[in-house]
Every structure is written in C-alpha cells, then in structure tokens.
C-alpha cells in the first residue's frame, strides 16, 4: 500500500443493508420501542430525532447489538444480527455511545487502537492492516498531530473526534453515533459533521441520534422521527419536517423556515403547544 | 477535515511490516503477532529485581543472621549445617509462601479493581477474604484434616463472591454497588468467624486463630502446595484476562460495540479472583490492604495502557515479603504478624487515597 493511499480515507466499503423487523425493545418489562420496521439507506446519513425518552438511544444500541430485542429482529444484510458472533457483528457495525469515558492518561492513538479490537485476537495482536487503519482513522479525524497526546489534555471537540476516530478505525460498513455533537460549540459541531459526511461518501451507512432538529435537517439525507417508540415520520428532511411534526414530537409550536444556504428546513420554536404567552426562559417540554 | 497529506513527522505505514505503535515492541511470525508494552515490561522487570533482592535479604536476615555470600549455597544445601537449617529448612518455605501469597493477592486485587472500575474494590473489601477466613476457621474447628482449610477457604471466597455479585445485581456495570454490597457481605462473614471462635473450645479456637490475622508464621505446607498449584493455573489465565480488561475499562456500550463478550470475561475475572484470594487466605490468613496497595504501585509503574497483572503480582509479593521481614526484625525476638504490618502501612495509604480521590477514575 502506497503512502498516499494509506493517508487517504478508507476506500469505498461493502455497503451494508441494515433494517429492523417488528422490533420490540425495552427494559424490565416496559417496552421502549414497539414493533419498529425501519430500513436504513446504505451510503446515506440517517438522523434519528425525537423527544427525550422516545427510545432513540435504545434503538441505536440495539442496532449495534449492545442489547438484544424483546421481540422481532435487527437484520444485517437480511440475516438476524443476534445470530452473528459479536466479533463478526463488530466488523460490520461500529457504535459510539454517549458519555464515553477513557482511563486517565490514555493517548489518542491508544484509544483509536481499541477500534481494531474486532479485527484482532490473542495471537494476532497487531497487523499491517491495523497500523494502516489506525493511521487512516487519525488522518480522517485530523488528529495525526495530536495522536500521542493524552486524551484528557485535549478540548471537548478534539476528544469527540478521537472517539469517532476509534469507530472509524473499526472500518465498518455501518457507523452509529449517539449524539456526537452534543456539548460541542458550533465550530466543533461542524468538524464532527464534516467527518460524518466523509464517512457516508465512502459508502458507509451512517446513523446519528441528534436532539437538535435543525442540525438533523441540515446534515442528514434521511430522517426518522420517533415518539414513544414508534416512527412518526420518515423521509427526507425537506419532505417530512413541518410545523405539525414539531408539535407532534416535542409539543412545541414552531415556524419551519428554509435554510437560505442549504435549502433544508430550519425550526424556529415559538412556545409550548397549548400555551398562549411566551414560555418561561427554561421551560422544558421533555420528560426529564 | 478530509485528510490530504500527512503533517511533517507523521509517517504512513507501508506494506509488509506492521509499524508498532509508540512504546511497544512488535513480534510477528507467520501471521501471528504479539504486541509488548515497553513500559509495562520495564516495570515488571524492575519489580522482579526488587523481589529477588528482597528474597535474598529475607533468607539472610533473622534472629541469627547468615551472610549473603553463604545464603545462596545454603539454599541448595551446601555450606555449614547451621546455615542450611536456617536458610533452607526454616526461612525458604516461609519466603516461598510469602511470594505465592503475595502474588495471589496482587492478581485478585488488580482484577477486581479493574472489573469494578473502582480501586477500592479488592478481595478485602468485597468480602472474599472474610468469606475464606470464616470457612477456613469453621473447618479447622470442625474437621481435623490438613486439606480442609484450603478447600473450605475456596468455598468461602466463592460464597462471598456469589453473594456480593448476586445481591449487587452484577459486578461490572454497577461497580460501586458491588463494592458496597461486598463490604456488607464481608462484615457478616467476619461476624461468622468471631462467632465460631467464641463458641469453639479454647484449644481449637487457638488452632484457628492464625486465619484471622494474617501471618506467614503458621502456614501449613499443604496449603502452600495447593496455593502453588492454584497460581500455576490462575496466573496465566489472569494474564490473558488482563489483556481483555484493558478494553473493559471503557463504558459497557463501547466494549459491546467492539464485539467483546463482556459477561464471559467478568465471570472469568471473578472466578480467578476467588481462587487466588481463597487459596492465599488458606495459607496465610487475610493480609490486610495488600491487594489495594500493590496494584496501585504496579499501575503507577506500568502506565495507563495496560492492566498490569504480572506487575501487580510482583509488587504484591514485594509488599508481603517486606512486611514479613519488618515484622520479623523490627521488634525481635517478638514477631509481629505480617498482616499487622500491612495494615499499619496500608491504613494511612487508604486514608490518603480516600482524601485525595476527587474525580479520579479507575484505574
């Protein structure tokens, strides 16, 4: 492999066909997601949106085999994900959950190396492919200069890019990111979202959980709106995001405008549905 | 964001070889490969040298000193009969027991701390040692058989582990809960020991007493042999588990997303810790705080990349041997049990740990 090739982001991957079939998810007898049928378009960015507690993160975890379904199935290329060996599943599907923490003192490169875990074994601890993949992931996340810095000395945006680089190094056809832009400022959000677009451009199926509807509209090709564990709307952001959907999802009256740059929907919330006056400054319509 | 050219100094990997990440050695042959962490290896080597030096001093020093130049021949039975008696017959078994007990406690400590993601979680605190001691004491009082303490200590530590894990609803995901429940289980089993000792006839209680303080003085040869066999199995298993545990320091969802079978590793870790802690208590009783102190030394030395199983075993052996050496010499001819010395040394350390633990995470 030439030097140039190794620094370029990974070439197009085998596209993966990820879907759910009558999927029930839940904990302790309560179903969070009910009879969900979903088809995630390969090579596109899908955003899952919805109010707090609607089952977004639970769904993402199930797509990565972190928890098993109560009923139904997640299908990877038409086969039941639960029937796959965990390692084989992890070679096709990568997940970055929320609130990831690393041991103190671990460097960016150490973390990104963990992404190679599903490709390694007890007697296959480091291969040329591993070295190349880690290098590509660091390059894709623009972290080559920071590779040997301890994570805890980096900014929030850089840390988040390091975590995403770990998932990139896994070199999976499906990349699942749970709120990858939360707690980041505007510039850092865009850095992360640019990286997300690069991943999709390589033919990966990217699924994001996002809490900001406008961000989702601007950056996703495909939008899935969940409420109470059911799909309320699904399609292109421009096609599905309306004032009715915002009221339905969040209980908020809003005006939906067009982004003057991208032409995608922009949501301007006005007040909580059913209220006449302006809302209190921090009124939270969610369940938390 | 898209990478164009690598910045100056960064070199891209080329075909054929696998450039080792910084700080590691790569050993590869026929598609198999090992990656050795240099800092961890250096740390283990340094600790091993210290252990060897402490073994030599322990063999030489005592109520009757044997010069170091005559100690080594005496180990293999050469030299004056008096030296051979002191070194080979009296001190060598004691030092060997100290090595084995220390290594076992260190392994159990580093495994449990990493599993619970809390460095206060050790075989002392989660009740394994108390369980082993309670069952060992009960068996000595009830069953007159030399194998009984080892077997029942094993059952005791397994019982304590099962109770702590079961009542906490898991050991890893709920590390803090596991620790608190373990403290309770340990206290209850400690009370069992006291009850058995209080109800037993005085000379039987005397025979069982060593299992309650922790000392290398009154070990049974059978228990040492059983511990040695147990370690021969547990240590290699622990080394393999230690590699997997590097990943388990991350959040569960991350680890599962990377295709690791978390439950299987947790079970292996608990089983290994039970064997190591149980057999070491059967040999020397509960040596307090060793399993807390030693892994910390090993981690400081080996760095954040690894879970230092071998380092913790060596550091722990070092702590136990030094504690025994101090106990034998500091107030000679009166001998302080090693368990008292480790508690005296470990107590202030534990306090320091509790007072300085701000947001520090494990490990």
Image (tube, rainbow, N blue to C red):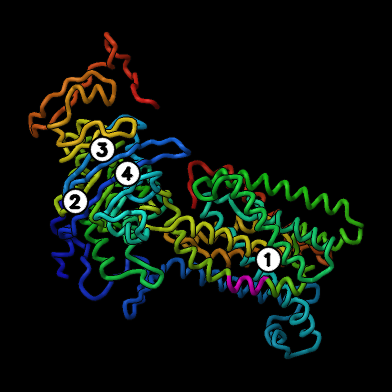
The span from disc 3 to disc 4 (Cα, nearest Å) is 9 Å
Describe the element under mark 1 as helix, strand or loop: helix
Q: Do labels 1 and 2 share a chain?
A: no
Describe the element under mark 2 as helix, strand or loop: helix
Q: Mark 4 lies on which chain?
A: A
Describe the element under mark 3 as helix, strand or loop: strand
Q: Nearer the viewer, mark 2 or mark 3?
A: 3
The residue carrying pointer 4 sits among few (fewer than 14), some (14 to 19) or many (20 or more) residues within 10 Å by Cα, namely many
Which label was assigned to residue B279? 1
Magenta part, dominant SS: helix
**B304 or A234: nearer the viewer:** A234
The span from disc 2 to disc 3 (Cα, nearest Å) is 17 Å
Q: What stretch is highlighted in magenta?
A: B227-233
* Residue A23 in picture, x, y percent from top left: 33, 43
Describe the element under mark 4 as helix, strand or loop: helix
Residue B228 is inside the magenta segment? yes
Q: Nearer the viewer, mark 4 or mark 1?
A: 4
Residue B19 is inside the magenta segment? no
Which label was assigned to residue A48? 3
């Amino acid at each position: 492999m030439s030097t140039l090739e190794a620094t370029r982001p990974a070439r197009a991957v085998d596209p993966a066909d990820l879907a759910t079939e009558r999927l029930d998810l839940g904990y302790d007898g309560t179903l969070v997601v009910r009879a969900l049928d979903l088809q995630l378009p390969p090579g596109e960015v899908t955003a899952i949106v919805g109010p707090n507690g609607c089952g977004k993160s639970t769904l993402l975890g199930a797509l990565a085999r972190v928890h098993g379904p109560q009923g139904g199935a997640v299908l990877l290329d038409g086969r039941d994900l639960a029937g796959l060996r965990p390692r084989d599943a992890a070679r096709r599907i990568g997940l970055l959950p929320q609130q990831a923490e690393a041991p103190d003192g671990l460097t960016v490169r150490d973390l990104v190396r963990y992404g190679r875990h599903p490709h390694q074994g007890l007697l296959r601890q480091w291969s040329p492919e591993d070295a190349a993949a880690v290098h590509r992931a660091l390059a894709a996340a623009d972290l080559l200069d920071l590779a040997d810095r301890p994570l805890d000395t980096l900014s929030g945006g850089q840390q988040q890019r390091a975590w995403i680089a770990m998932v990139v190094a896994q070199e999976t056809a499906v990349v699942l990111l749970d709120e990858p832009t939360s707690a980041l400022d505007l510039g850092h959000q865009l850095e992360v979202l640019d990286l997300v677009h690069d991943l999709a451009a390589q033919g990966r199926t990217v699924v994001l959980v996002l809490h900001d509807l406008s961000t989702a509209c601007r950056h996703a090709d495909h939008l899935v709106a969940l409420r109470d564990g059911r799909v309320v709307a699904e399609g292109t952001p421009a096609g599905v995001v309306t004032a009715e959907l915002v009221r339905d999802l969040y209980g908020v009256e809003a005006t939906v405008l067009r982004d003057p740059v991208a032409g995608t929907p922009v949501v301007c919330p006005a007040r909580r549905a059913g209220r006449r006056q302006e809302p209190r400054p921090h009124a939270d319509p969610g369940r938390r | 964001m898209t990478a164009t050219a690598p910045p100056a100094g960064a070199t891209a990997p080329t075909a054929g070889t696998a450039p080792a990440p910084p700080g590691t050695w790569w050993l590869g042959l026929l598609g198999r490969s090992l990656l050795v962490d240099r800092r961890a290896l250096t740390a283990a080597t340094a600790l091993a040298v210290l252990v060897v030096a402490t073994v030599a001093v322990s063999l030489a020093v005592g109520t009757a000193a044997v010069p170091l130049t005559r100690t080594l021949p005496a180990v293999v039975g050469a030299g004056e009969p008096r030296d051979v008696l002191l070194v080979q017959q009296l001190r060598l078994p004691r030092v060997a027991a100290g090595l084995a007990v220390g290594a076992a406690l260190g392994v159990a400590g580093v495994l449990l701390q990493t599993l619970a993601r809390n460095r206060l979680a050790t075989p002392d605190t989660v009740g394994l040692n108390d369980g082993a001691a309670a069952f060992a004491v009960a068996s000595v009082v009830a069953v007159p058989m030399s194998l009984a303490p080892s077997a029942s200590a094993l059952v005791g530590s397994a019982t304590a582990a099962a109770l702590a894990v079961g009542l906490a609803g898991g050991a890893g995901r709920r590390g803090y809960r596991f620790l608190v429940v373990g403290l309770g289980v340990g206290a209850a089993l400690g009370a069992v020991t006291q009850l058995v000792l209080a109800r037993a006839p005085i000379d039987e209680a005397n025979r069982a007493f060593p299992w309650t303080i922790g000392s290398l003085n009154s070990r049974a040869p059978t228990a040492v042999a059983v511990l040695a066999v147990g370690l021969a199995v547990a240590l290699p298993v622990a080394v393999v588990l230690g590699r997997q545990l590097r990943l388990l320091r991350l959040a569960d969802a991350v680890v599962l997303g990377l295709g690791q079978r978390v439950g299987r590793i947790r079970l292996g870790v608990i089983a290994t810790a039970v064997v190591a802690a149980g057999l070491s208590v059967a040999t020397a009783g509960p040596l307090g705080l060793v399993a807390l102190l030693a892994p910390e030394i090993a981690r400081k030395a080996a760095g954040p990349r690894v879970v230092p199983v071998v380092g913790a075993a060596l550091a722990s052996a070092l702590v136990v041997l030094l504690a025994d050496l101090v106990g034998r010499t500091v107030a000679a001819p009166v001998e302080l049990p090693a368990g008292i010395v480790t508690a005296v040394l470990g107590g202030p350390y534990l306090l320091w740990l509790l007072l300085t633990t701000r947001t520090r995470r494990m490990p």
